[in-house]
Image (tube, grey):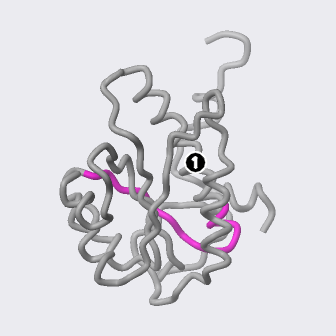
Amino acid sequence: METWDAITSRRNVRQFADRAIGEELLDQILEAGRRAPSSRNWQPWDFVVVSDREQLRELSKVWRGGGHVADSAATVALVVEKRDEQRRRETAQFDLGQATMAMMIAAADHGIGSGHSAVEDQAKAREVLGLPEDREVAYLLDLGYPADRPLKPIKRPDRRAFDEVVHKGHW
């Protein structure tokens, strides 16, 4: 798939086929996240990838809307150091967004769907993933082949009109 096709095909997938993602391909998706840009090359992230079915079931319980994590082929926990300083937290969130999107596009390039989840129960996430006390999970990125229909470019996305969003030179 070409980059533009991967971007226009990417959609949130919440139902996954019972099909594993090959280790090489999963590593390539993780590498896309590792190579994502970050402020001053800080790279505030660590990625914990989970593909064990029982561990995925437990991980799906860290957020009330995270049931789809249980059925994913793999889920990536984006882990950061706990920070009190607002500016550092905000910078980390921006960087994590770039890493997340890089992984989503890399996945879409291979026909793998993705979705993202919040984490409400940090204690449960820490227990399931074996995280040190000074770390927390910012997001979960679930991955898998879509159960309903394959990824393909979306002709009419449910988005605001281009001219409504894009302002050239001034508002």
Q: Residue at x 28, y 52 (%)?
A: 119
SS of the residue at dot 1?
A: helix
Indicate left or right for 124 with 29 as reference.
Answer: left
Please, is residue 139 above or below residue 127 in the view? above
Please report the bounds of the magenta region as a residue range. Answer: 106-119
Instruction: For the N terminus, give its image quadrant.
Output: bottom right
Q: Residue at x 58, y 59 (%)?
A: 104
Indicate left or right for 113 with 1 as reference.
Answer: left
Indicate left or right for 129 with 19 as reference.
Answer: left
Q: What residue is shown with label 1?
A: 99
Indicate left or right for 43 with 37 as reference.
Answer: left
**In the rendered image, which quarter is residue 167 located in?**
top right
Measuring from the top left, give residue 94's x and y in whole percent.
51, 34
Q: Residue at x 76, y 55 (%)?
A: 4
The foreground one among 151 and 117 is: 117
Measuring from the top left, give residue 156's x and y in whole percent.
61, 55
Q: Residue at x 68, y 49 (%)?
A: 35
Q: Which residue type does callout 1 highlight?
A: Ala
**In the rendered image, which quarter is residue 170 located in?**
top right
